[in-house]
Image: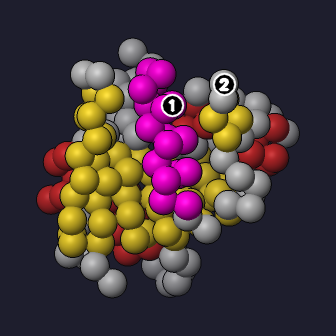
Amino acid sequence: MMYTKNDIFVFYEIINDIKPQKVLDVGMFLKCVGSVSRKIMDKKIDESIWMEGVDFMPEIQFPVFQRIYNETISLPFFLQQSHKQEKYDLGILLKNKESNPDNKKEIVEKMTEMCHYILTNECEISGYCKKEIEDTIAVKVENDEYYIFIFKG
């Protein structure tokens, strides 16, 4: 199973509700769903929002991804960044049954160092967080559940 229409809906709705200045998209959701822009159906992400993608499939590249994402980096590069002081308002890690990285714990730990909010469809990531969780918001769309973790500081 790949991503669903609910995943797409939640991705756009949460970004547009939170109105972040900077988004860290781990797994490059828009690339995975085959988007050729920041717009799908009637949903759109404003061009003023900085989007950085962490690419799980760097061997697949098309120029369109450079228009969607302001910057893209590989997963190994992302995990090796020990000194990066970059802060993101929102980090996104939506998994599907075909993309479940083996190093999820490392990914989540790194994201919690850099992000104020994390949107995910996995509730068990809370055990991997390096920062204290201030609140968790559960979002249910039909039979799918998503979680927004809000971190202190």
Distance from the alpha carbon under mark 1 to that under mark 2: 10 Å
How many C-alpha atoms fall within 10 Å of the one at disc 2: few (<14), some, or many (≥20)?
few
| Residue 85 image offset from top left, x and y in percent | 52, 83
As drawn, is 8 to the left or to the right of 65?
left
Q: Is residue 48 above or below residue 13?
A: below
The residue located at (49%, 32%) in the rendering is 9
Q: Position of residue 91 (x, y in %)?
A: 45, 58
Q: Residue at point 21% right, 65% down? A: 135
Residue drawn at point x = 68 percent, y = 60 percent: 49
Disc 2 secondary structure class: loop
Instruction: Answer with left or right where residue 126 lies relative to residue 88.
Output: left
Q: Residue furthest right?
A: 63
The stretch in magenta equals: 3-19
Q: Between residues 107 and 131, which one lies in front from this camera angle?
A: 131
Magenta stretch contains residue 33: no
Relative to 48, residue 41 above or below? above
Badge 1 vs badge 2, beta-carbon distance below 8 Å: yes
Find disc 1 in the rendering and name its residue. Answer: 8
Residue 41 image point, x, y percent:
66, 25
Single out the mark in the foreground, 1 or 2: 2
Task: Give the secondary structure at mark 1.
Answer: helix
The amino acid type found where label 2 is placed reads Met
Q: Tell me, yes or no, whether the highlighted magenta stretch contains residue 9.
A: yes
Residue labelled with disc 2: 41
Magenta stretch, main secondary structure, is helix
Q: Quadrant of the C terminus?
A: bottom left
Left or right for 82, reference 112: right
Q: Residue at x 31, y 54 (%)?
A: 148
- Location of the N terminus (image quadrant): top left
User: Going from the N terminus, do you reach mark 1 or mark 2 first?
Assistant: 1
